[in-house]
Amino acid sequence: MTAPKGTPSFTTLQSLAAEETHISIITKVLSRYTNITVEKERKVSDFCDNYEYSMLKEGKSQVIRSDGGWIYKDNELIGVAECKYQSSRQNACERAAKYIFVPEIYKNPSKLFISCYGQGFEMKQGGGSTGPFIDMARNIGVSIHENLNNNDLEQAFEEWLIKQINLS
């Protein structure tokens, strides 16, 4: 969804800081590996034969941008690294579910790595909007991590990346 011109940004300073941390760590880890390339965005038309709802005014396909990127080894998609920040009552994490509809990830959900930050990702008894998303994502094999410090995020991403490289 594109907001009308002049609409204030939905991105908070906390969300921006989380994305910057995620991108920095993902970039640092990826720089250690050869034969790895990263694309920041992919066209919806790359995945769909019919994309009439995803067409821009000028007739081009909309794109899906990933914070950490679409990660390739020898031109094969081995994963996507996404970051989500959520305060206590929003649905940012659910927007990450769109990656499940990418054919390569649908076939192998472990290709999706999500780092999550914010109050909305603190485990609480009694539910919350993020609980079902986290449990359902883990159930199908998504690598999802909430509120990790920088060292733990780096370690989790590198372990995930090595697994994806070995599976390719």
Image: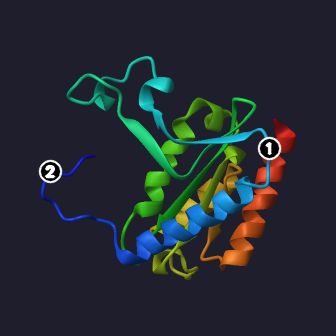
**Colour scheme employed for the rendering of this structure:** rainbow
User: In this view of the protein, can residue 65 be seen by the observer?
Assistant: yes
Vertical comparison of 105 with 124: above or below: above
- The relative height of residue 79 versus residue 148 in the rendered view (above or below) is above
> Dividing the picture into quarters, in which one does residue 43 lie?
top left
Binning the other alpha carbons within 10 Å of mark 2 as few (below 14), some (14 to 19) or many (20 upward) gives few
| Disc on the earlier residue, 2 or 1 | 2
Q: Secondary structure at mark 1?
A: loop
Q: Are marks 2 and 1 in contact (CB under 8 Å)?
A: no
Q: Nearer the viewer, residue 30 or 15?
A: 30
Q: Residues within 10 Å of mark 1 (few under 14, many from 20)?
A: few
Q: Residue at x 83, y 49 (%)?
A: 163
Per the image, the residue denoted by label 1 is 34
| Label 2 vs label 1, nearer the camera | 1
Residue 50 horizontal/vertical position (percent): 39, 19
User: What amino acid type is highlighted by mark number 2?
Assistant: Pro
- Residue found farthest to the right: 166
Q: x and y percent of residue 132 in the render?
A: 54, 63
> How many numbered circles are shown?
2
What's the distance in space between the residues labelled 2 and 1, CA to CA? 42 Å
User: In the figure, 165 relative to 161: above or below?
Assistant: above
Residue drawn at 12 percent across, 58 percent down:
6
- Looking at the image, residue 44 sits to the left or right of residue 113; the answer is left
- Estimate the x, y position of residue 3 in percent, counting from the top left: 20, 51
State the SS at label 2: loop
> Of the residues shown, which amino acid type is indicated by label 1?
Thr
In what quadrant of the picture does the C terminus appear?
Answer: top right
Residue drawn where x is 29% and y is 29% of the image: 53
Nearest the camera: 79 or 69? 69
Residue under circle 2? 4
